[in-house]
Image (cartoon, helix red, strand yellow):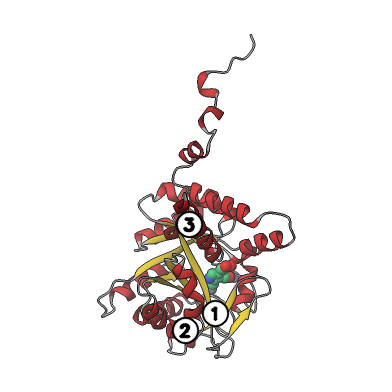
């Protein structure tokens, strides 16, 4: 007998107009609260520097950040993630500048807080931007990681950012048990306001960080990060790392990069539905879209919207994206069009 479709096999009866299509796409909308903007803060106070591998993204000196943020905040920006970039300040084996008052991220936090009191400020915590060897750890003489010294430095840096006024500490180093160490450090602060901990829980060893390493000048001078960042094929380590970080006091968890790891977002969100899930659309993902659009190969707004929607569909609550200013601009336009009708 010939195959007979049943009543529930008619899908197109359920999405023939815009409203119906939205009903079929629950929890995938993108609002201002779903976006976090990374910002590179360089140690030349008045600099505004282009980044050749990330067209449209700039490094800003401490005196230029507020000016850059003004229109973005006016468009609804809710949260930022600060990355200090050292070009002139000295780098050494232990990253001494990181928790000093010379750190441009530490200098800029009070300026941002004063100008934009309701903006939420997160700080990336790692050592690679401050160490002479460009790694995220401190090493023993035999080349193995010295966990005691590494965790002590990461904790000291986290405390310094918190004391400068950061709302969120975001360790990206991937060292075992850093969440425990940093959490204890933050709790020991004599500070009334709480500080949250956003763990880069499932950060994979990725070629998509290429442009960032140019932007931040943090490429390792030898070897790679494969002994601490996760192997790209490992779902098991991602699950174990997220479970550990949650048990050690992370307030939020993250998957990074985004597009090549949608299954990990989905898996971790279903295992930890009570924790806000972040995804980092990293520098290489930004560059892929930017250069493809520049070459006329695809429409940036449509391709980007599709990508961001896929993050939401996979289970991400917050998307860290260098495209945040553009997206906020589009959201503003859409809101204005709606208010006209
Ligand atoms: N640990 C530093 C750090 N924090 C965020 C990124 C990547 C961000 C991006 O590519 O946009 C990196 C680079 C790396 O681990 O090599
Ligand atoms: Zn690092
Ligand atoms: Zn290694």
Determine whether the beta carbon of the residue marked 1 sits less than 8 angstroms from the nearest atom of ligand 1.
yes
Dot 1 lies on which element?
loop
Residue 28 appears in the figure: yes
Tell me whether the residue at label 2 lies in contact with that at label 1, contact meaning CB atoms closer than 8 angstroms: yes
**Ligand 1's quadrant:** bottom right
From the viewer's perspective, tell me whether residue 83 is left or right of residue 260.
left
Q: Residues within 10 Å of mark 3 (few under 14, many from 20)?
A: few
Residue 284 in the image, given as x and y percentages of width and height: 63, 64
- Please tell me which of labels 2 and 3 falls first in the chain: 2
Disc 1 designates what residue? 129
Residue 82 appears in the figure: no
From the viewer's perspective, tell me whether residue 287 is left or right of residue 100.
right
Disc 2 designates what residue? 98
- Quarter holding residue 73: bottom left
Q: Cα distance, mark 3 to mark 1?
A: 41 Å
Of the two numbered discs 2 and 3 in the rendering, the one whose residue sits closer to the viewer: 3
Q: Cα distance, mark 2 to mark 1?
A: 8 Å
Residue found 58% across the figure and 52% down from its top: 307
Q: Cα distance, mark 2 to mark 3?
A: 43 Å
Disc 3 designates what residue? 336
């Amino acid at each position: 007998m010939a195959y007979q479709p049943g009543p529930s096999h008619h899908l197109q009866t359920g999405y023939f107009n815009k409203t119906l299509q939205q009903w079929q796409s629950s929890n995938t909308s993108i609002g201002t609260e779903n976006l976090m903007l990374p910002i590179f803060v360089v140690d030349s106070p008045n600099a505004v520097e282009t980044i050749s591998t990330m067209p449209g993204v700039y490094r800003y000196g401490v005196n230029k950040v507020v000016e850059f943020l003004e229109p973005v905040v006016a468009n609804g920006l809710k949260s930022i993630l600060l990355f200090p970039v050292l070009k002139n300040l000295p780098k050494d084996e232990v990253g001494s500048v990181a928790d000093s008052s010379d750190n441009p991220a530490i200098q800029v936090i009070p300026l941002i807080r004063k100008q934009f009191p309701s903006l939420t400020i997160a700080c990336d915590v790692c050592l690679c931007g401050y160490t002479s060897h460009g790694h995220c750890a401190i090493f023993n003489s035999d080349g193995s990681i010295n966990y005691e010294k590494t965790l002590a430095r990461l904790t000291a840096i986290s405390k310094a950012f918190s004391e400068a006024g950061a709302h969120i500490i975001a360790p990206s180093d991937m060292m075992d048990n850093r969440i425990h160490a940093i959490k204890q450090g933050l709790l020991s602060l004599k500070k009334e306001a709480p500080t949250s901990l956003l763990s880069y829980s499932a950060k994979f060893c990725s070629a998509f960080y290429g442009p960032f390493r140019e932007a931040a000048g943090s490429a390792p001078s030898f070897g790679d990060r494969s002994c601490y960042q996760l192997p790209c094929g490992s779902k098991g380590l991602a699950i174990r790392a997220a479970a550990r970080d949650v048990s050690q006091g992370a307030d939020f968890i993250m998957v990074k990069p985004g597009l090549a790891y949608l299954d990990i977002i989905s898996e971790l969100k279903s295992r930890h539905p009570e924790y806000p899930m972040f995804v980092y659309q990293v520098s290489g993902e930004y560059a892929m879209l930017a250069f493809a659009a520049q070459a006329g190969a695809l429409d940036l707004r449509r391709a980007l919207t599709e990508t961001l929607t896929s993050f939401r569909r996979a289970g991400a609550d917050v998307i860290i994206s260098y495209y945040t200013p553009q997206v906020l601009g589009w959201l503003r336009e859409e809101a204005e069009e709606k208010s006209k009708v």
